[in-house]
Image (cartoon, helix red, strand yellow):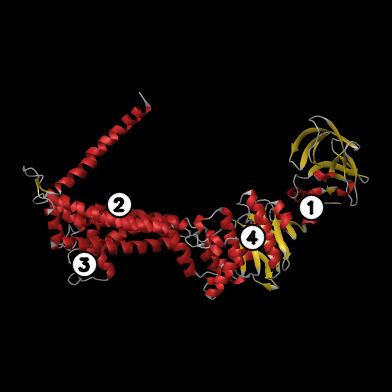
């Protein structure tokens, strides 16, 4: 296992700037997640590390050794593709054995057998070894392609949205398995996803990408509690963060067209800002300082989403359990003052 | 009128046409193959049992016809497959002008076989043709006479057939190649597979079904080969290029118009083609996994 460093990577496809001066460091044994919307440059980053794409500028190094000039085969990485990428016309066993049987580094057949059996057991696909890959379900196929990555000990695992083609239930269970596998192996893993839940639950650290720019790197808690920009704030957390246009002056923030007024805790801001409030920080209660009317409630079982109107602004609040609010009823609420997110010009966090 | 009645009325013309043009001749020729009969004589068909089949299977000239056809089909289809697949591999990655080049390569197979035969006759012409000239034979007295020598005539037909039909194999192989997703090769590159390994384990198995279809089509066509041979050599010199379908034509529509015997020969050819096709189809199903 290795640590991987990207320095000032730039990549363009024609006129499109896929990656703009990206620098990242993935530590040895870390589960690192690249999070971002479609077209953010996550997959391109992964393919550049694997050697499937060449960057226009910048350096890729494994353990301090620059690997820019190395071919994919010589970089010793494992890649799990979104589309499974199993070799058709071959059995599951042969697919798993494929990386070991490569003529460039031949492994003795007894060792191949032992490693394939071990990997199959870990992924619970031992009973499928004799099957042709065309006769597998989506979840089984993805297990096999993960198995093909773990039969050898690569320097880094690169996973490109490996769970996104699976149904929700399977995704959840495979998520847990992957995380478990990574922790027991202590393998360096770079995992690409557009799903913020996958990112928050699996990652040791997350890097948020958008339109080829690196917006923020941090632990899941960092990213959730201190989003660096409005894009990060909106990308992470369900239901989405409330973003309200506001005016800042004299250490106070006045939300436009509403009676919401909160103190600016720390940081400096004046003029036009965006005030971000997580739904769980909008706390409904009879003693609340602010007043709003209920537009709609969505019951989710463990919690209920309450959509409020407060002056000209709409807000969402999360309430535990069922909420007894009728539409158009008036409710009082408070806003946790120490958990506010204030974004200044260009959506950059100021507090 | 009920729906089924309307359906029947719509289908009826086709069914009548099929019965008149296909089914009746098929069954009637099967009957004729067991008789002595000629369409130009007034005598009615005379039942002779298996005598026609026995004559065909014991006559060395017929066996020679089959041997020529078999040799021709084998060599011709093998060359077409190798050249067609090779061309497809070369044209697989797009480059400037590759679209136009592909279209140009496909031109021969769009031509009429008779037209092809006529101008290849000119190309093969020992005194005026360009073929010998390109091969370096400039002395008319020693240059080979492709269509006139018994040892060369079949090869000449093979050359024309390969020229005409390799593009067809290329077209199908190209379709198969373009259906192979890039990520398979990327996965193989990361798994450190060699180029030969990638070709053998990814390219070949993925193209195989379409390649087999191309080979199946070409083999059936080669067994039925008539117009090209007729136009180029007419079966000659002697019987050097007399394929079974040329023999069938001579038997049925020349000299005695031996309809009974030619019907029997037609059935023998049909059985052989069905048998060969079945072998391929079995392979095809295996290749599909």
What chain does badge 1 belong to?
A
Which residue is tagged 3? B152
Real-space CA distance between mark 3 and mark 4, rounded to the nearest whole angstrom: 61 Å
Determine the secondary structure under disc 3.
loop
Check residue A159 in the rendering and tell me which mark sits there, or answer none. 4
Real-space CA distance between mark 2 and mark 4, rounded to the nearest whole angstrom: 52 Å
Determine the secondary structure under disc 2.
loop
Check residue A224 in the rendering and tell me which mark sits there, or answer none. 1
Mark 4 and mark 3 in contact (Cβ < 8 Å)?
Answer: no
Q: Tell me the crowding category of disc 3: few under 14, some 14 to 19, or many 20 or more residues within 10 angstroms, Cα based.
A: some
Real-space CA distance between mark 3 and mark 1, rounded to the nearest whole angstrom: 82 Å
Determine the secondary structure under disc 4.
strand
Q: Earlier in the sequence, mark 4 or mark 1?
A: 4
Real-space CA distance between mark 2 and mark 1, rounded to the nearest whole angstrom: 69 Å
For the N terminus of chain B, which image quadrant?
top left
What chain does badge 3 belong to?
B
Q: Residue at x 48, y 58 (%)?
A: B96
The residue positioned farthest toward the top in the image shown: B1
Q: Residue at x 82, y 52 (%)?
A: A225
Which residue is tagged 2? B111
- Give x and y (percent) for residue A175: 67, 56
Q: Are marks 4 and 1 on the same chain?
A: yes
Q: Is residue B8 visible?
A: yes
Q: Tell me the crowding category of disc 4: few under 14, some 14 to 19, or many 20 or more residues within 10 angstroms, Cα based.
A: many
Which numbered mark, 2 or 1, is in the foreground of this view?
A: 1
Which numbered mark, 3 or 2, is in the foreground of this view?
A: 3
């Amino acid at each position: 296992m290795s640590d991987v460093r990207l320095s000032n990577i730039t990549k363009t496809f024609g006129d499109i700037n896929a990656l703009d001066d990206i620098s990242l460091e993935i530590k040895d044994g870390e589960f690192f997640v690249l999070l971002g919307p479609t077209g953010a440059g996550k997959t391109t980053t992964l393919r550049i590390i694997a050697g499937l794409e060449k960057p226009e500028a910048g350096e890729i190094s494994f353990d301090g050794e620059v690997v820019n000039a190395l071919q994919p085969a010589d970089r010793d990485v494992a890649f799990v593709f979104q589309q499974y990428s199993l070799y058709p016309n071959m059995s599951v066993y042969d697919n798993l054995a494929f990386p070991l049987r490569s003529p460039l580094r031949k492994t003795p057949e007894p060792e191949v057998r032992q490693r394939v059996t071990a990997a199959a057991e870990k992924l619970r696909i031992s009973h499928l070894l004799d099957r042709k890959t065309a006769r597998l379900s989506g979840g089984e196929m993805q297990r096999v392609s993960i198995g093909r990555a773990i039969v050898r000990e690569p320097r880094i695992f690169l996973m490109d949205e490996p769970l996104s083609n699976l149904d929700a239930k399977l995704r959840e269970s495979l998520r847990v398995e992957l995380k478990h596998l990574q922790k027991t192996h202590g393998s360096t893993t770079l995992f690409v996803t557009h799903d913020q839940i996958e990112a928050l639950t699996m990652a040791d650290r997350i890097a948020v990408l958008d339109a080829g720019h690196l917006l923020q790197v941090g632990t899941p808690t960092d990213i959730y509690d201190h989003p660096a920009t409005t894009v990060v704030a909106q990308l992470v957390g369900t239901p989405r963060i409330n973003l309200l246009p506001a005016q800042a002056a004299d250490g106070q923030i006045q939300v436009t067209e509403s009676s919401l007024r909160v103190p600016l805790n720390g940081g400096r801001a004046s003029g036009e800002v965006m005030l971000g409030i997580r739904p769980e920080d909008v706390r409904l209660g009879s003693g609340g300082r602010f007043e709003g009317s209920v537009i709609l409630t969505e019951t989710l079982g463990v919690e209920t989403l309450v959509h409020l109107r407060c002056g000209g602004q709409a807000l969402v609040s999360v309430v535990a359990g069922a909420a007894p609010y009728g539409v158009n009823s008036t409710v009082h609420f408070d806003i946790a003052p120490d958990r506010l997110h204030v974004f200044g010009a260009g959506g950059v966090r100021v507090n | 009128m009920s729906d089924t009645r309307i359906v029947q009325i719509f289908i009826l013309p086709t069914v009548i046409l099929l019965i008149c043009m296909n089914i009746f001749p098929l069954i009637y020729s099967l009957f004729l193959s067991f008789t002595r009969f000629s369409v130009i004589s007034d005598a009615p068909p005379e039942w002779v049992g298996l005598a026609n089949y026995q004559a065909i299977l014991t006559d060395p000239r017929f066996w020679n016809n089959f041997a020529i056809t078999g040799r021709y089909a084998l060599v011709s289809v093998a060359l077409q497959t190798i050249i067609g697949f090779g061309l497809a591999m070369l044209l697989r990655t797009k480059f400037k002008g590759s679209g136009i080049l592909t279209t140009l390569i496909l031109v021969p197979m769009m031509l009429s076989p008779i037209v092809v035969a006529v101008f290849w006759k000119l190309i093969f012409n020992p005194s005026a043709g360009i073929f010998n000239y390109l091969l370096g034979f400039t002395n008319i007295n020693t240059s080979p006479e492709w269509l006139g020598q018994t040892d060369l005539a079949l090869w000449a037909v093979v050359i024309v057939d390969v020229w005409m039909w390799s593009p067809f194999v290329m077209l199908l192989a190209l379709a198969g190649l373009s259906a192979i997703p890039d990520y398979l090769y990327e996965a193989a590159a990361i798994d450190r597979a060699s180029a030969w390994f990638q070709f053998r384990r990814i390219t070949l198995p993925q193209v195989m079904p379409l390649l087999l279809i191309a080979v199946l089509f070409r083999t059936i066509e080669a067994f039925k080969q008539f117009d090209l041979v007729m136009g180029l050599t007419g079966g000659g010199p002697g019987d050097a290029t007399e394929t079974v379908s040329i023999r069938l034509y001579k038997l049925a529509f020349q000299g005695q118009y031996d309809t009974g015997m030619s019907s029997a020969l037609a059935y023998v050819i049909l059985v052989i083609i069905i048998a060969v096709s079945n072998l391929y189809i079995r392979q095809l199903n295996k290749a599909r996994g």
